[in-house]
Image (cartoon, grey):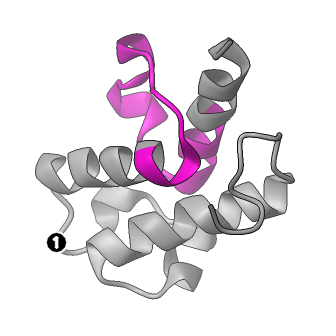
Amino acid sequence: APPGAGADGAAPAGLRAAVAEEAAAVLRVPAERVLGGAALNAIPGFSSFRMVEIVERLEDRLDVSFDADDLVPENLHDIDSLCRIVRRARQEQP
């Protein structure tokens, strides 16, 4: 795993960067655009299919499994919301 993306409780900045990189790669925009707090659904090309791809990439990269209850629109609208569900998923893993 890249630095800051391990299951060892990555620093918030490292986690935020990793989440932004994955979202930006899927949405084909610079990471800075999503790091600025932009709503993901405001980015041209966003769709529910893109969100599924972002979620899958985050689960793979960060070695987490999201709870279905966390995968609701209000938890998926920006980078900080995604970081919160990553942190929750890490806390729930054995």
Q: Quadrant of the N terminus?
A: bottom right
Picture coordinates of residue 31, whole percent (x, y): 53, 80
**Identity of the residue drawn at 68% across and 56% down:** 5
Q: Which residue is mark 1?
A: 45
Depth order, front residue of 26/35: 26
The quadrant holding residue 81 is top right
How many labels were placed on the picture?
Answer: 1
Residue sitting at 32 percent across and 46 percent down?
56
Task: Answer whether residue 18 is magenta in the image.
Answer: no
Which of the pair 59/81 is nearer the observer? 59
Q: Which residues are magenta?
A: 60-84
Q: Is residue 89 above or below residue 45?
A: above
Looking at the image, residue 76 lies above or below residue 57: above
Q: Residue at x 71, y 50 (%)?
A: 6
Q: Is residue 84 above or below residue 35?
A: above
| Residue 78 position within the rendered picture, expressed as x and y whole percent measured from the top left | 50, 52
Quarter location, residue 84: top right
As drawn, which residue projects farthest toward the right?
11
Say whether residue 83 is magenta. yes
Residue appearing at x 82%, y 40% in the figure: 9
In the picture, measured across the screen, residue 91 lies left or right of residue 54, that is: right
Question: Quadrant location of residue 26?
Answer: bottom left
